[in-house]
Image: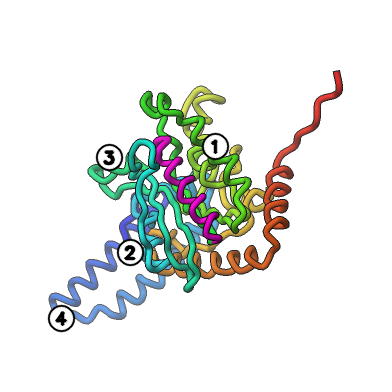
Amino acid sequence: MMASSPLDFDKNIRELEAQIERLQGLARDGGLDADSEVGTLESKLKDLKKNAYGSLTPIERVQLARHPNRPFTRDYLERTFTDFMEMHGDRLYRNDESILGGWARLEGRTVMVIGHQRGRDMKENLHRNFGMPHPEGYRKALRLMHQADKFGHPIITLIDTPGAYPGLGAEERGQAEAIARNLREMAALRVPTISVVIGEGGSGGALALGVTDRIIMLENAVYSVITPEGCAAILWKTADAKDKAAEALKLTAPDLKALGVVDDVVPEPTGGAHGDWDGVADALRETLARHVRELEAMDRDDRRRARWRKYEALGEWREPAPA
């Protein structure tokens, strides 16, 4: 699927794509022979994309991760998986539409898939709360994880949220407790667990689906404790320093892979995932199937101990001296 791009750094690419589209329209409607001109422009476009996307800065990857035409959880459920059967509700309060979850098949293997869901337009964004879950969303996710654990099937989570919803109602219903409970319970699950950052992974709202055996990121996804704008406002007292903040946060897939936070990175098509939904979905399917096979081959207790060691090894800590 091809889509127009609102990114700041690819204006020339968009203009060239529009020129190619106009020529193709003239050839189609007016019977003109424009194959040679189109071929020349397409070759130029390919080189332009290679140069523009070959050395992206961290803030440019943030822009790509937030691209409105980037595939969301629902799009991967339709392409990477088959036979998805959605499940609703946390059995305590209501169904949170910002988190999708249910049974699906991955290359014939039954799995539980849970992910954040954003909206494509204002109406859907209001329905999905802009991909920011309430506590009942996290409780729904945990209910489905426990169900998968009960029946012995792998769990795959798709992370794409600016963060948990910070509204008064969410706080009154225990937002922090819901996130904390997910962190604890995911650490103890007996089945293979994999999380994939498909877009923007923001703070505890993302981490509540991210304590897994393996963490995978799409090439242009980002994963951080705070947005670059928020970090810049705190440290430099101005959101204009967001470029500097994005660099300091080490939020890109290559950075996090180098730091050992992320286990695998799925390449995206040149120009970003929004340019080829099917291609990136196929690449993700192959990567997920490989990791599921590797994790299922491990002894259950060994797998859980390896999960604990993974998170214990992140960062630095020490025991306090005896009093």
- Residue for point 41% across, 24% down: 172
- Mark 3 and mark 4: Cα distance apart in space: 45 Å
Mark number displayed over residue 126: 3
- Main SS of the magenta part reads helix
Q: Does the CB distance between marks 1 and 4 fall below 8 Å?
A: no
- Mark 2 and mark 3: Cα distance apart in space: 25 Å
Residue span colored magenta: 133-152
Front label number (1 vs 2): 1
SS class, disc 1: helix
Mark 1 or mark 2: name the one nearer the start of the chain: 2
Mark number displayed over residue 31: 4
Q: Does the CB distance between marks 3 and 4 fall below 8 Å?
A: no
Q: Is residue 305 magenta?
A: no
Q: Is residue 241 left or right of residue 94?
A: right
Residue 51, how many percent across, how many down?
Answer: 50, 60
Q: Is residue 273 left or right of residue 301?
A: left
- Label 1 crowding class (10 Å Cα cut-off): few <14, some 14-19, many 20+? some
Mark 4 or mark 2: name the one nearer the start of the chain: 2
Which corner quadrant holds the C terminus?
Answer: top right
Q: Mark 2 is on which residue type?
A: Met
Q: Does the CB distance between marks 1 and 2 fall below 8 Å?
A: no
- Mark 4 and mark 2: Cα distance apart in space: 24 Å
Considering every residue shown, the one lying at the far right of the view is 322
SS class, disc 4: loop
Residue 294, how many percent across, how many down?
Answer: 64, 67
- Residue for point 44% across, 36% down: 164
Mark 1 or mark 3: name the one nearer the start of the chain: 3
Q: Mark 1 is on which residue type?
A: Arg
Mark number displayed over residue 181: 1
- Mark 1 and mark 3: Cα distance apart in space: 27 Å
